[in-house]
Image (cartoon, grey):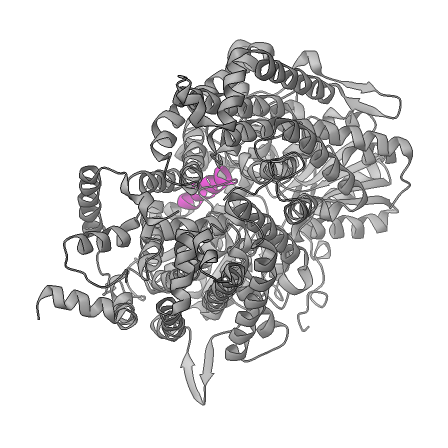
Amino acid sequence: MSEITPSLLMLQLVTGIALGTVYALLAIGLSLIFGMLNVVNFAHGAFFMVGAFLGVYFLGLTGNFWLALVIAPLVTGGIGLFAERFLVRPLYGRGIDYPLLLTFGLSYVLIDVVRATFGIEGLPSSTPAALRGAVNLGFGHFPLYRLFLIAATAVVVLALWLFLEKTRYGLIIRAGSRDAEIVRVLGVDITRVWWLVFGLGTAIAGLSGVLAAPTRAVNPEMGIPVLAESFVVTVVGGMGSLPGAVVAGILVGVVFSMTALLAPAYAEMSIFVLMALVLLVRPQGFFGKAGALG
Amino acid sequence: MSHQDFANTSSASRRHLLQLGAAGAAVGTAPFLFNIASAQTGNIKIGFPVPLTGAFSAEAQDQVRAAELAVKEFNDAGGFNGRKAELLVRDDKLNPGEAATRTLELIEKDKVEFIVGSLSAATQLSINAVTRERKVIFNSISQSDAINEAKDWSPYTFHEALNPHMTAGAVARYAFPKYGKRVVYLTADYAYGHEMVRGFERAGKALGTTTLADIRHPIGAADYSSFLPRIQALKPDVLVMCNFGRDQLNSIKQATDFGLKEKTRIITPVLLLTARQAGGAEAFDGVVGGSSYYWGIEDTVPAAKSFNDKFRKAYGGAVPSDYGALGYAGIRSVLQGVLNAKSTDSQKVSEAMGQLKYNWYKGDQYFRKCDHQSVQSIIILESKSKGMKDKNDVFSVVGSEAPSETNLRSCAELGHKA
Amino acid sequence: MSLENLVNLGARYRVASVLLFLLAFPWLMPYEALAVNILIFGLFAVGFNLVFGYTGMLSFGHASFLGVGSYLTGIAMVHFGLHWLAAIVVGVLASLLAGLVVGYLAIRTRGIYFSMVTLALGQVIYYLFYKAERWTGGENGLRGIKAEVIDLFGFRIDFLNPMTKYYVIWFFVALAMWLVSRILASPFGAVIEAIRENEKRTAACGYDVARAKLLIFVISAGVCGLAGSLRALHLSVVPVDSLHYLQSGQAVMMCLLGGMGTFFGPFVGAGVFLYLEDVVTTLTKYWMGAVGLLFMALVLFFPRGIWGTLVHQLQRRGLLQVERP
């Protein structure tokens, strides 16, 4: 192996953080849905993929990346709203495994619908013109778009935090995830809240898809490995915890990146080993509530 | 989950669905106890397992189209003793377990006499494991180094496609003298990737190249950003992407994002037409790679023009892709073997194919005796982003390596007794 | 003999009924390789059902045991030249061991964490086998499993003959099903069902819940491992994706389709799933979407599954007095 210089390590670290932001966004969506509805969304990777396709499609249609960045997650969230209302809602009260299994089936359907709509090959995606090129960070050249990813994720996380902490609706959501019964007693239509949170979670998954699209091939199968990866992050951070999702996302991205540098063959395995370790030592994750849910 | 949870569903709706389901099952199940078609009369059945669904379905569908063209030609010319050929296409889902099951189905239920197909190394090896036990000829139409090796091979195994060793060698011999001697490999960490690297390094050794690094990435990885800073730091003359399909597309895109194309030439062992069309001109701009076939050689190769015209006529102006052409050739080789042997007996056809000299679509070819590898030309392409006349005009032909056994690993090396 | 008596007789002697049905089964299928696949995956689903349907633990890593059984049997034959019977034993022992290791680590968690742990550990095993190329063939899978003519105490059996192959595999499946039935009918079988219904109460009654869970997990792994061993002999190759979580997901689907917590349900589920897959694949290229729709319909409307619903209906009408065959 060639020399590992400090600047190489720094560059690798920044790369890991950029990778981690995509993971973090995915995990936030997953955690929101789980924390609020107690549903493990096995279609999360598929929503990511749908978002990516819609992002590329709307970019092609309007020529405007920023517009696509807004529309695509909204449409994805809309699909999520539909799914919750008609597919997931009937299963509440039946036990935690049913929505999981249902969303597993849903992922299969979403993949084939995308294949039927956009073709099996996928769509070519490229970095939007305004965000192209590389920036000299001092220790190496780094793609501008990936810096944008880091910034965009920070903005989304901040906006979400403000929403949850500072608005009335955010208060309802936080209360509902602690004790749905009491919130209902207080006169809030908790079913509606769940519906909207599911939509929000899937919209965020779609957003991460739009953001990730320029960095990778957009094809119907792109969500399959992503699902396992987002589980890793959510478990490490703590299912239902948003700060956990962000921290764990970045951590997993960095672990993957550094392993890729030092022991490339084990990069893929490394995140699952991390997940297994966390589950065995601290099953609720870094930030999760203690008392493993059964 | 306890039994109490089952309670809350409407029994009327369930009953209705049950009835529908039962009716459907009754229609679908038919005991296929007697197989009417016998092996010596009736159609010559050729099984064609390819991944109609999944990541390479576009290539597979092209293989099917081209294969059907070959079958039609054979039938229009009278067939064999009045017997026509019939193509039985099956979806192996790019999954070796499924490929083995489909092959068993084709042999046991459909009683096929030959099998042509596959689009990945793993699936062809799986198909081959089934066909060789039952002495059925299998002509593989996709890349694999392992299938020529003695432990997988059988006298009924034929390999129409290129193998990684040939392809990598040809690209190396073109690119290294032209672009430089300091080489980095970004390799998909599975047999195919390793075989490619081996091919490149062997050719490179003769040319005096230095391998700065061979970086392995997990197959199917979507994000290569973790590997690129290191490559950037090494400042190679040539970056070889030893991967395939979407992996290749992803890695090339991201390498471009990291600005690697400024100082480094990106080459790849195989440039797929469909991947290039899906990935777009920009991502692939300037990338050099090899291929078994590109329609653009029709300007210099008459057989290609003839094949392309047939394909255009049959499929509304479309041109055949690299893997499509292999679908055509794979079928033609087998059927010519039948005609030459004047029989459909596996042993006789195998011998006839072993002695075949042919030119179906790109020049002279033949099967090497010890391992039935088709000795053929390899085309070197460079991806264009300007001056494209239409959506098919995506590559410039920059070189071509003539068919030669010296490009292959020796029979002894593969474990065959001399 | 009235229908009711027949039904109850069949249900009481459930092992014999199932095995008799399976004897005739290949005649119902369009080709024997499909019938063999159904046997193998039926056994896989039955093994998985022990943990999922009977004990209530949703494992997403059970493909590991199918894969370990396949690979170790294959490796025993290809690299060590063992006799096929010995190789099957090796495969089963290896999967029991794997079950012990994974089970020991996973049992400490419950609910979705359990599902996540089993998924993660399953993926680790997948990558380990993937990377051990020299032994497993890596991406290309393990080839070279020669099972053309197998000898059984002096008798030479033509394993290539599809019918013969079916009955040889049937024999092993029969053994396993008998074993599973005995376990389920035993007091231990009652304990694991009690754990599914209410874990705390079971512990309060004085049963060692953790030990029971581990035991059933190991047994389940062994049964799945046997299915894997048989699969290696059937296909002559071991494909590496036998170990992937999507294969585990398939086991879940088959159990759900057939009926969790019933003896014959998983078999029905495996049979219907594989048969449909075979048929649907010829009708449309969107078989994945079709499977997804089917699965969602099941979860929403038929959580008991095909066999489970049938059994339930018979019980409701008083025709069936035996508990869940």
- The answer to whether C68 is drawn above or below residue C126 in the figure is below
Farthest-out residue, bottom: C154
| Residue C107 percent across, percent down from the top left | 56, 55
In which quadrant will I find the C terminus of chain B?
Answer: bottom right
Is C178 left, or right, of B266 in this rendering?
left
The residue closer to the viewer here, C259 or A291, is A291
| Residue C104 percent across, percent down from the top left | 59, 59
- The answer to whether A63 is drawn above or below residue B247 in the figure is above
| Residue B358 percent across, percent down from the top left | 54, 53
Is C223 left, or right, of C311 in this rendering?
right
Q: Is residue B129 magenta?
A: no
Q: Main secondary structure of the magenta part?
A: helix
- Count of numbered circles on the image: 0
Any part of residue C230 in sight = yes
| Residue B108 percent across, percent down from the top left | 36, 64
- The answer to whether C70 is drawn above or below residue C270 in the figure is below
Q: Residue at x 69, y 48 (%)?
A: B189
The residue closer to the viewer here, A197 or B340, is A197
Q: Residue at x 21, y 46 (%)?
A: B24
Any part of residue B264 in sight = no
Is A278 left, or right, of C195 in this rendering?
right
Say which quarter of the image contains residue C25. Answer: bottom left
Say which quarter of the image contains residue A142. Answer: top right
The residue closer to the viewer here, B266 or B301, is B266
For the record, the magenta segment spans B54-69
Farthest-out residue, left: C2
Q: Residue at x 74, y 39 (%)?
A: A255
